Image: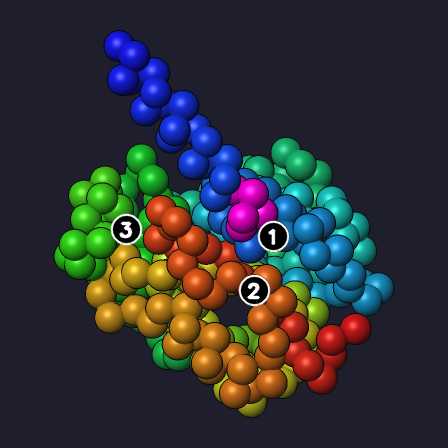
Amino acid sequence: MKNNILLSIIKNFKNKLIKLVYRKKNLTFSGSGEYLNIINLYKIKLKNKPIIVEVGSLDANDAIMIKKFFAEAKIYSFEANPNQIKIMKNNINESNVDIDVINSAVSCENGEIDFYYSGDDNPGASSIYKFSHNSDAIEHTDAHSEKLMHVKSIRLDEWMKNENLSSIDLLLIDTQGSELDVIKSLGSKINNVKKIILEGQYVQLYENTPLIDEINDFLVKNNFKLKSNNLKRIFNKLFNNFYYVNLNNEK
């Protein structure tokens, strides 16, 4: 009994120490509100009537929070999973806000692509990539089912052209491993994106997906700067959120 109590005390102390050491680096927030937490933490400001694009919305709850925070923002929310669209629209209607819902994946391809649905228990783990069988990802992989679906996909540069959008003030990406695909789909329009918050993986949770180092290298080459300073893997974290600014539009 004494040993169990001692181990519990040590574990609690260790967790508190980790949180203290990484208090300004650990940007993993579970559930709804993760984007808003980062916006508040870094005091992110946007111009009047900003354009905000969310890719990988799931239930629109994050978009709703951000719309209430940036009341004048025009928000577009992409969601690949058709099963989630009714949920998104219901949540938006109940919140009495104006958000454009787009039932499409975003990738480097226009047309139809494979999409792996992770099941009703946790649809947020769905991806255009299959689950990895990497030993580091087994706990994540074993917790979900995997059902192949076919969904619509569009490139962001093509979509911006169709919507007559010259720039994006804040791009939010949580697509379970395809974040770099979303960024590359901007083509030269990446120069017209001012700020990005994205989820990146420290270990491959899905097959052949780029880790955060590769995403970071691509963004740095395209004149973005990491503001959240958390590339190094944090204890017991498989993924994290990362905040970037375009150096040409850092204000």
Residue beneath the point at 78% across and 61% down: 45
- SS label for mark 2: loop
Could you say which is closer to the camera, residue 248 or residue 158?
A: 248
Q: Are marks 2 and 1 in contact (CB under 8 Å)?
A: yes
Residue 60 in view here: no
Identify which amino acid the numbered label 1 is placed on. Lys
Q: Position of residue 90 (x, y in %)?
A: 55, 38
Can you say which quadrant of the picture contains the N terminus? top left
Between the residue at mark 2 and the residue at mark 1, the CA separation in whole angstroms equals 8 Å
Q: Mark 3 points at which residue?
A: 117
Residue hosting label 1: 24
Report the residue at 70% width, 69% height from top.
Answer: 169
Amino acid identity at mark 2: Asn
Overall secondary structure of the magenta section: helix
Give the mark nearer the N terminus: 3 vs 2. 3
At mark 1, the secondary structure is: loop
Q: Say what secondary structure mark 3 lies in.
A: strand
- Asked if the residues shown at circle 3 and circle 1 are in contact, with their CB atoms under 8 angstroms apart, the answer is no
Residue at mark 2: 229
Q: Could you tell me how far apart the alpha carbons at marks 3 and 1 are, in whole angstroms?
A: 34 Å
Magenta residues (range): 19-23
- Other-residue count near label 3 (Cα within 10 Å), few / some / many at <14 / 14–19 / ≥20: many
Residue drawn at x 36%, y 61% is 202
Relative height, residue 180 to residue 75 (above, below): below
Q: Which of marks 3 and 1 is in front?
A: 1
Neighbor class of circle 1 (other Cα within 10 Å; few <14, some 14-19, many 20+) is few
Kindly tell me whether residue 30 is visible in this rendering.
yes
